[in-house]
Amino acid sequence: MSEQSDFPPPPAANLGVKKTRVTADGRVVVDTWDPFRRSILATTEFYRGLAEAVANSFTALNDELNSDRVNTEGLTCTLVEGLAEGNARFYETMAKSSRRVFDHLRPDRTVVVATEIDYDRLARMIAAELRKDAAAGATPRTSDPQIITP
C-alpha cells in the first residue's frame, strides 16, 4: 500500500506562518511566531495526524480482510494479521505526525538569510591577493601538492 496521504499538507504550509521581512540594514529575516499560534498549529497537526493514522489502520485491516484470503486462510488468521498490520500502520503514522507536532512546538529561531554574493568584488579581491603574492615571490597557497612546483 502506498504511503500517499489523502489529507491536505500540514497547517504551517497552508497558513504561511513563517513571515519574512527586510530590516533597515537590508538583511532578510524570518520572524518568530508567538507561543499561542505554535500551540494551535501543534494541536491541529496532532488531530490531523490522529485522523490520518486511524484511516490508515482501517485501510490496512480492510486490505488484509479481502474475500480471497478469508476463503483460503480463514477469518481468524486474516483478522489477526489485519489487526497487526493496522496497528503497525497506526503507530507509524502517529510517529510521523508527532515529529511534525514537535516541530510546531519548538520555538522558532530568527534565521538570517544570506545576501546575494557580489562576484565581481570577490574576483577583484582574489586578483589583488594573487598579485600581492606574486610580487612578494611567495609560493602559491594551495593544498594540492600537484600544483606546487619546486
Image (tube, grey):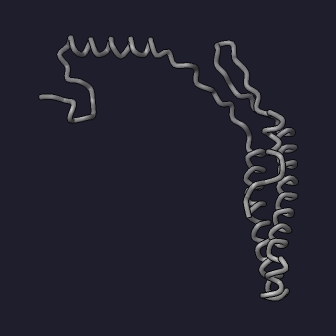
Residue 60 placement (x, y as % from top left): 80, 69
**Front position in the image: 104 or 50:** 50
**Front position in the image: 31 or 127:** 127
Residue drawn 44% across and 12% down?
121
The residue positioned farthest toward the left in the image shown: 150
Q: Is residue 102 left or right of residue 27?
A: right
Quarter of the image with the N terminus in it: bottom right
Where residue 5 sits, quadrant-wise, is bottom right
Residue drawn 76% across and 32% down?
18
Where residue 38 sits, quadrant-wise, is top right
Height in image: 124 above or below 107?
above
Residue drawn 88% across and 54% down?
47
**Front position in the image: 132 or 77:** 77
Height in image: 80 above or below 25?
below
Q: Is residue 3 left or right of residue 71?
A: left
- How many numbered discs? 0
Residue 129 placement (x, y as % from top left): 31, 15
